[in-house]
Amino acid sequence: MRTSGSAQPARELTAVSADGTRLHVEVHGPEDAPPVVLAHGWTCSTAFWAAQIGDLAADHRVVVYDQRGHGRTPPSPVCSTDALADDLEAVLAATLAPGERAVLAGHSMGAMTVLAAAARPRVREHAAAVLLCSTGASRLVAESTVVPLRPGRLRTWLTGRVLGSRAPLGPVTPVAKSVLKYATMGAASAPHLVERCARIVHACPRQVRHAWSRVLSALDLDHAVGELRVPTAVVVGTEDRLTPPVHAHRIAAALPHSLGVTELPGLGHMTPVEAPGVVTGRIRELVVTYTQLKEGA
């Protein structure tokens, strides 16, 4: 298998969303392999999925894309869950053949993207199964534990101020890495993984970070969970401060076809980076169970 360090995009293309936003898309792996579509989260980019690309692209067609304003996709004046859904539909239309079924996996805001698009025609057409990593559907600010206070109005207000800050993140210093590790990763996370996540997050323009923080602070996708009618697995770190396990269990309980919650002890919010083998393995299981076996039946 190729390693994440040596994986190169097999193909790059542009998907055009409903409002004209041009989305950077990469397709890795054999063209005739079973497809997997990965959607990254807030302040991240396609680079976030390096470990999954490096493993899966040996025998899967792996589609990754930059959310609007992130990575190589330019910012847009429109930031909303409807826009996220439009963007996912555009990526599916640009990379999958009519009727072709794929496993969709999203992390954080990427998983929220899948929820937001759950009732959309292209998701209904193309989704064979879904993996939701480290995410929530509502009450993100109120239930975050980034600020170490008891639940209540003060913690919610302070959390909103912290996550919605317009301040630049600046260079990736030891202090910056410590802050990011506390907020987004488990205490035992390896230094090179903290470094990788810090460089990805710090590369996100602060205006983009702030614009999407406003969308996330008002997020209400509880109604959308019931629209995700394909087999869906949920993964969460037990020490996730941004989307604590309460979110994962609430979503799983409301899913029409829930495959349950996998809790990863001691891990934080960045589960695809912190536990790449577990997340990649879960994607592989979904491909085998819900795409390959169905096609061969």
Image (cartoon, rainbow, N blue to C red):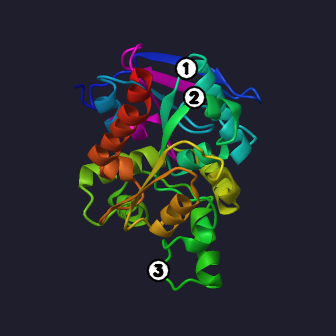
SS at circle 2? helix
Q: Earlier in the sequence, mark 1 or mark 3?
A: 1
Q: Residue at x 25, y 63 (%)?
A: 188
Residue flagged by tag 2: what amino acid is it? Answer: His
Q: Residue at x 75, y 26 (%)?
A: 20
Q: Position of residue 86 (x, y in %)?
A: 70, 34
Query: Can you tell which mark lies on residue 96?
Result: 1
Q: In front here: 139 or 292?
A: 292
Q: Earlier in the sequence, mark 1 or mark 2?
A: 1
Where 234 sits versus 59, above or below?
below
Query: Is there any visible trace of residue 42 in the rendered image?
Result: no
Query: Can you tell which mark lies on residue 148?
Result: 3
Q: Residue at x 53, y 25 (%)?
A: 25
Query: Is there any visible trace of residue 26 in the rendered image?
Result: yes
Query: Can you tell which mark lies on residue 71?
Result: none
Query: Can you tell which mark lies on residue 126?
Result: 2
